[in-house]
Amino acid sequence: MFTPSENWDDLSRKERFDARFQSWMSTEERAFDTPEAEATYERRTQRVKDIVELKKPDRVPLLPWIGGYFAEYAGFTPHDIMYDAEAYSEAWRTFNLDFKPDYLVFAGYANPGEAFETLDYQVYRWPGHGIKEETSFQCIEDEYMRADEYDFLIDNPERYYMSRYMPRAFKALSGWQMLPSVFTTMELPIIPAYITPIGTPEVQASFKALLKAGEQALAYGSVVAENEAKLAAKTGMPSLPGGVTKAPFDIIGDTLRGTRAIMLDLYRRPEKVLAACEALVPVAVRMGVETATGQDNPFVFIPLHKGADSFMSRDTFRKFYWPTFKATILGLVEQGLVPYHLVEGGYNERLDIIRDPDIPAGTTYWSFDQTDMKAAKEALGGWACIAGNVPSSMLHSGTPEQVEDTVKELIDTVGQDGGYAVSNGAVLEHAEAENLRAMVETCKSYGVYD
């Protein structure tokens, strides 16, 4: 785990960036099976650092987005990998060893199905729990935050989330609605106001469910982590990304209110939406910093959803989405981290907006899905590294020749001077192995720089 130095607050942004990368790239305290694996780790961490800093690495990095396909490829169902940590590990190991990407593929954090059952999680249906065992998990949007609760969220986001959202999203935690503010513990005579409700059957049941789910998640995660460490030691493949957070608007639009409700809120209570997004900036920054620091990895994964061209107009994006998203980016960058954006959908009408002069060049990573890559290169070149967008549909239903031609064209047109990584656009759930192999092999052979 990366530990910031005692004088961390006195360091410049660049000094913090260098400190985090030095820790992540160092091999001194990492175990490797062979000198070749250690050298591979050094080369691949340097390669991705180079593109972030808009330099030419030895070759174009390969950073695919792999969802449930790793399980399908290895012969497992989505249910298998959510309920059996060894199955998850075996599928993930098989995929990485067979395809040999530059970095251990990010297939989503380990998802322990038993823990979700224990918590009676409402926001998703997952294999064997609401959907078929052969189907990947699906989000079920609802108004888990009520329209009249904006003021509570704005006043105290974390307390709102714990006492209102979580009891609705996790039915087993419904007792948490009875808990008062933790500040009632500040004086002896009023401490009973906090601890007495904890003795009630409803609150006791919620904490017992949380403890059980924690044990289940730890048992599952420990197996996955042990197998990941073994594979990293064998192959020298680094893990990417490290931390995770979300744009403030997406925290509300994806998680709290849902798509329909947030779009109505833009017209019915726009000032509340703006104030809530501003209140969530410190939450989003802190979440990214804490998760990335805990993984000793400077990259913070940020999936972008409601800001796409198809969800809102350019003016709406500029007013409601971008200001607090930008503030989140700046907060992460100031702490020496690299916001690692998965830009889902199209951002063709946003490119000039996101190239903001307040965001330092060479500090962010943008992986595009349906955005015109030539336009992205023209708009962001010399300012931020970009990746994508080999169509995931092509990897599923195209031919190896089509994939090879697409990868070569992308390297020739947007990757010729560095600052670029080969990646598919949308997260990959289904594919033909020969097509994915064509993407991997073409990148490795054609993407070498002189």
Image: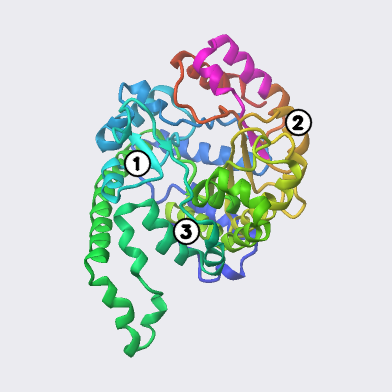
Which percent across, then down, holds residue 371?
68, 31
Q: In the rendered image of this protein, does residue 131 appear above or below residue 254?
A: above
Secondary structure of residue under mark 3: helix
Q: CA distance from mark 2 to mark 1?
A: 37 Å
Dot 3 crowding, Cα within 10 Å, few <14, some 14–19, many 20+: some
Q: Looking at the image, is mark 1 or mark 3 earlier in the sequence?
A: 1
Q: Looking at the image, is mark 3 or mark 2 earlier in the sequence?
A: 3
In contact (CB < 8 Å): disc 1 and disc 3: no
Q: Amino acid at mark 3?
A: Glu
Viewer-nearest of labels 2 and 1?
1
Indicate which disc residue 290 carries.
3
Q: In the rendered image of this protein, does residue 79 appear above or below residue 446?
A: below
Viewer-nearest of labels 1 and 3?
1
Is 397 placed left or right of 187 in the picture?
Answer: right
Q: In the rendered image of this protein, does residue 343 appear above or below residue 321?
A: above
Q: CA distance from mark 1 to mark 3?
A: 20 Å
The residue range painted magenta reads: 385-410
Dot 2 crowding, Cα within 10 Å, few <14, some 14–19, many 20+: some
Is 271 placed left or right of 155 in the picture?
Answer: right
Image quadrant occupied by the N terminus? bottom left
Dot 1 crowding, Cα within 10 Å, few <14, some 14–19, many 20+: some
Quadrant of residue 349 within the rendered picture: top right
Write the residue at 73% across / 24% down: 413
Towards the viewer: 308 or 361: 308
Dominant SS in magenta: helix
In contact (CB < 8 Å): disc 3 and disc 2: no
Which percent across, then down, holds residue 229?
34, 42
Q: According to the image, label 1 marks what residue?
A: 111
Name of the residue lying farthest toward the bottom: 189
Q: According to the image, label 2 marks what residue?
A: 375
Image quadrant occupied by the C terminus? top right
Which percent across, then down, holds residue 263?
62, 46
